[in-house]
Each structure stands twice: as structure tokens, then as C-alpha cells.
Image: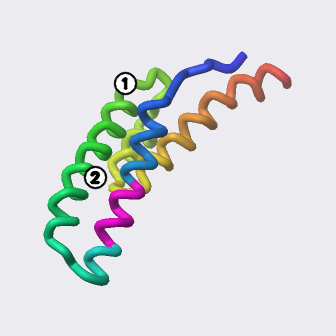
Amino acid sequence: MTMGRNRTHLKIAAVVEFASLAVLLINLATLHYPAVASLTGPIHGCAYLVAILSVLRDPMKRGTTIVLALIPGAGAALALRQLASANEEPTAAARA
């Protein structure tokens, strides 16, 4: 029996966190407009914090999931992947 946990906030935070980091790095490598950094930096920071808080509130979290969530840029996606695999583990054990 899978736990149908709704992780919409974490999914959105993962996409926004990754996309905003990509925008920041592309801006840094090319034109380096301060306005882009001023707008995108706080968006990235908020998405990063939402991702961490979403992982901390998830009942299926583990210590490694929290550590993964702390990685800027890709941590939310990695944590989301680990949480999804944690949901699948009980079903695999139930089949055996």
C-alpha cells in the first residue's frame, strides 16, 4: 500500500530552485546584469527554503533526505526522488 503523499510544494520548489539557479549562473557567465541577480537571487533563496521546509515536514523523511535537501540547486529534486523511492519500499516488501 503506497502512501499517496501530496508533495506539490516540494515539486514546485524543486523546479523553481533549479531554474533560478540556472538563470543566475547563465547571467553570471554572460552579461552579468545586476538586475537579474537582484530579482532571481531572492526567488532562488525562497525556493531553497521552501524545499527544505517541505522535506522537514514530510513524514517519510530520513536523515539523508534532509542532507540532500540542503544541496543548493539540485537538492530538492534529489530529496524528492528519495522520498518517492521511500514510498515504493513498503510495496516491494509486501509482494515478497
Mark 1 residue crowding within 10 angstroms, few (<14) / some (14–19) / many (20+):
few
Of callouts 2 and 1, the N-terminal one: 2
Residue 57: numbered disc: 1
Query: SS of the residue at dot 2?
Result: helix
Q: Is residue 67 left or right of residue 33?
A: right
> Magenta span has 24?
yes
| Residue at point 49%, 48% (across, down) | 77
Q: Is residue 93 left or right of residue 26?
A: right
Q: Position of residue 21 (x, y in %)?
A: 34, 61
Above or below for 27 versus 5: below
> Magenta span has 70?
no
Above or below for 9 versus 39: above
Looking at the picture, which amino acid does disc 1 mark? Arg
Looking at the picture, which amino acid does disc 2 mark? His
| Residue at point 62%, 18% (across, down) | 3
How was the colour assigned to the protein in this rendering?
Answer: rainbow
Q: Position of residue 54 (x, y in %)?
A: 37, 31
Magenta span dominant secondary structure: helix
| Residue at point 20%, 57% (across, down) | 39
Residue tagged by mark 2? 44
Which region shows up in magenta? 18-25
